[in-house]
Amino acid sequence: MQVTETLSQGLKRSYRVVLPAGDLAARLDSQLVEMKDKVKINGFRPGKVPMAHMKRTYGRSVMGEVVQNAVNEANSKIVKDGGFRLAQEPKIDFPEDQAEVEKALSAQGDLAFTINIEILPKFDIGTFGDVEITRPVAEISDTELQDAINRLADRNRPFTPKEGVAAKGDQIKINFVGKINDVAFEGGTGNDIDVVLGSNSFIPGFEEQLEGVKAGDERKVKVTFPENYSAANLAGQKAEFDVTVTAVSAPGEVAMDDEFAKGFGLESFEALKEAITSNMKAEYDRASRDKAKRALLDALDKKYSFELPEGLVEQEFNGVWDQASAEQKASGRTFEDEGTTEEAARADYKRIAERRVRLGLLLAEVGEQSKVQVTDDEVSKALVERVRQFPGQEKMVWDYYRKSPEALAQIRAPLFEEKVVDHIIAQVKVTDKVVPKEDLFKLDEEAKV
C-alpha cells in the first residue's frame, strides 16, 4: 500500500492511497482461503470447493470487505504516523471512472482513492492565573424571605365559594378557547382552570380583564403574547380568548405556625423558614455560578485564539442556523422585523459557532490534560433526572439511553463540561460583587454558550 500526502493546508490533509492489483488479489485469495473450510456449497465437500468457484460465488462481496479493510488500514496509518487527532470522520473519495473501479474490484487493476481529513489544532493552554472574572452574588434579605413564605402560603391558601363578582385576590374557575385570527391554536384551550386574579400567572393583561366577573359570565379577553414568550410561534402574536367563568371563590386565611409547617413534614415554623432559606440559597448559588461560568467563557474566548476545523464550525453553524430559522418560521417574523438582514444574521451566527467550537476544544483539552473524570454513578444520576422528565415513559427512555452510546454521551458531555469549568474557576482570580436579586437572575440577552 502506497500512501502519499497531496495536501497540507492549515488543518486539512489529503492523501492518495494506492493498493496495487497484486496486493488486492493476494488479500482476496487470503480471505477466500479462510472461508473455504466454513462455507457449504451444494455438490462440494467442505474444504474442497475450487478457488475459481469461490471467486465466482463470493469474490464480489469479499472484495468489498477487502476494500473497506484497506480504507481502515490507511486511515489508521495516516493518523498514527502523523500523530493526528481527527476533528471528524475522514472523507473517502473513490475514482469517478466506473471502469477503473470495476477493474479494482475484480483485482485486474490498482485500487486508488483519496482520504481527506481535518485534524484538531494543537495549542498551548498555559496557565489561568492571568484570568480575572467578577462573580455576582446576592444576599437573601428578610423581605425576600418573607416574600417566599408568603408565596408558599398563597399556594396553599384555602378558597371558599362566594356570591357576587370576583375581585383581585379571588380565585375563579374558567374554561377558555384561545384564537389567533379567529383560528384556535394548539395549547390555547383549557377547562376547569383555576386562576387567582392578580397572581400574574397568565399572559399580561389576561387576569385584569376578568376582574368583576361572576359565575356564569362569558367574556372575550384580548391579549398580546410577550415577544420573549416560550412558544416561539406565539411570541408577539395578538390573541383573543373566549372565556366562561364557572365559579368564583374568596381566599381564606393561612395561619403561619407550627401546624402549617407540619403540613410539609417539618416540626416547626422555624424549621420551615430554615428550609426555605436553604432552598433560596441553593437557587442563588446556582444563578451566581451560572453568571461566573458565562464570565469565564467570555474571558477564555478573548484569551485564546487558534485555527478552528472548518468542518466543526460548519456543523455547529448549521445547527444554530436551522434552529433559528425554525423559530423564525414558527413565529412568522422576518429578519427585517428583528432589525437585521439575513447576511448580518448569518455572520452573527457564524461568530457564535466559532466561539462554541473554540471553547469546546479548549475545555476538552483542559479536561484531558487535567484528567477530569465523570463517574458512571454521576452519569446514572443525571440519567435518572432525565428520565423523570418523561412520566409514563420512564422504562422506554431509560432503555434508549442505555442501549445508545451516542445518546448516553449527550448525558455525560455537560457533566464533563461543568467539571472542567469548576476546575478552571478554581485557578482564576474571582472577585465577588454583591448585586440586587433582579440582576443575579436577569437573563443574558445573548446566551452564546
Image (spheres, rainbow, N blue to C red):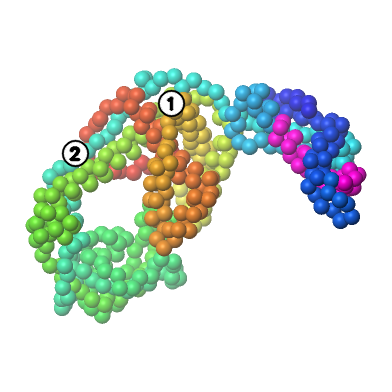
Q: Residue at x 75, y 26 (%)?
A: 3
What residue is drawn where x is 36% and y is 32%?
Answer: 422
Task: Tell me the element at label 2.
Answer: loop
Which residue is pictured at 47% across the width and 28% down the height? 368
- Give the crowd class for mark 1: few <14, some 14-19, many >=20 residues within 10 Å: few
In three-dimensional space, the C-alpha distance between marks 1 and 2, rounded to whole angstroms, equals 34 Å
Q: How many marks?
A: 2
Three-letter amino acid code at disc 2? Glu
Give the x, y percent position of residue 65: 76, 42
Q: In the rendered image, which quarter is residue 5 located in?
A: top right
Q: Which residues are magenta?
A: 48-74
The amino acid type found where label 1 is placed reads Ser
Residue 66: in magenta span: yes
Horizontal and vertical percent for residue 103?
88, 39
Q: Which residue is mark 2?
A: 139
Instruction: Mark yes or no: residue 60 visible.
Output: no
> Is 54 left, or right, of 66 in this rendering?
right
Relative side of 31 to 295, left or right: right
